[in-house]
Amino acid sequence: MRQKTFGGAGGRIPSICARLERCAVFADVGCDHGYCTQYMLKNGLCDRAVISDISAKSLSKAQALLSGYISQGRLSCVCCDGLAGVGNADLVLIAGMGGEETVKILREGYIPPSFVFQPMRNAEMLRAYLLSKGCAIEEDNIFRDGKFYFIIKGRARGGTANYSAAELAFGRDSLKNPLIKEFLTEEEGKIEAWLARPMSGESRAELIGRLNFLKGVHCGEIK
């Protein structure tokens, strides 16, 4: 079997690409440099692809990298906001955006048949939205490439059993991953450092509540 190859980027990109499966039409929304699309096309994992970005400058970087596939007619490039103009795709990747922004894109567009999302923040908002729409979440995990990242893979239909509070906050598979202990320790340290600074009583109470939740998950008291 031919070995799959990656583009010239660090560990975050291979971690995302490892979750991408064979499809007819692949779309990378907010494609940035286009490394994930390069991976799909180079390894024959899609018949054709669409890249989009709201920034023409960012899109131009991906166009330069993937110019050969554009000339072959295997790749379309769209400068647009979210899924507007992308059309229907079997598998959609949205990586590097906030969870709230990803939810906005899905609300204004559509939930693709298959998806891989790598939210940079507010992942719990994205999880809650996908669950509310009856999506099947197949993997909801954590990985590390210098910093910690959450990654969510699934399908538009099939449903997933209700998440617990800890699963909603950090991902069902993440809680079984040894990395979660490191993540929680790091987050607890950040909050403890913030609590040493002057702040309003309301802000302090909010941070203490967050810290107690993290510690509860860490020790297994909160599932």
Image (spheres, rainbow, N blue to C red):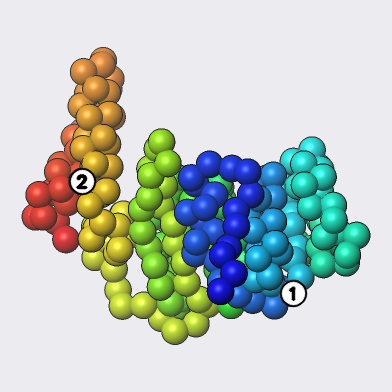
Q: What residue is shown at x 49% (from left), y 82% (from top)? A: 157
Q: Position of residue 189 (x, y in %)?
A: 22, 29
Q: What residue is shown at x 40% (from left), y 73% (from top)? A: 138
Residue furthest top in the image: 198
Q: Amino acid at mark 2?
A: Lys
Q: Residues within 10 Å of mark 1 (few under 14, many from 20)?
A: some
Q: What residue is shown at x 30% (from left), y 57% (from top)? A: 174
Decide if residue 178 is on the left or right side of residue 102.
left
Decide if residue 127 is on the left or right side of residue 57.
left
The residue singled out by tag 2 in the image is 181
| Quarter where residue 89 is shown | bottom right
Task: Return the residue nearer the eye: 195 or 51.
Answer: 51
Q: Position of residue 11 (x, y in %)?
A: 48, 45
Q: Position of residue 71 (x, y in %)?
A: 90, 60
Instruction: Count up the numbered dots.
Output: 2
Q: Residues within 10 Å of mark 2 (few under 14, many from 20)?
A: some
Q: Earlier in the sequence, mark 2 or mark 1?
A: 1
On-image quarter of the N terminus: bottom right
Q: Which mark is residue 210?
A: none
On-image quarter of the C terminus: bottom left
Task: Return the residue nearer the eye: 209 or 126.
Answer: 126
Q: Amino acid at mark 1?
A: Asp
Question: For numbered disc 2, what is the local secondary structure?
Answer: helix
Residue 183 lies, with reference to residue 162, above or below; the image says above
Marks 2 and 1, Cα distance to the nearest angstrom?
A: 40 Å
Task: Return the residue nearer the eye: 170 or 36.
Answer: 36
Q: Position of residue 36 (x, y in %)?
A: 63, 55
Question: For numbered disc 1, what is the local secondary structure?
Answer: strand
| Quarter where residue 205 is shown | top left
Q: Which mark is residue 47?
A: 1
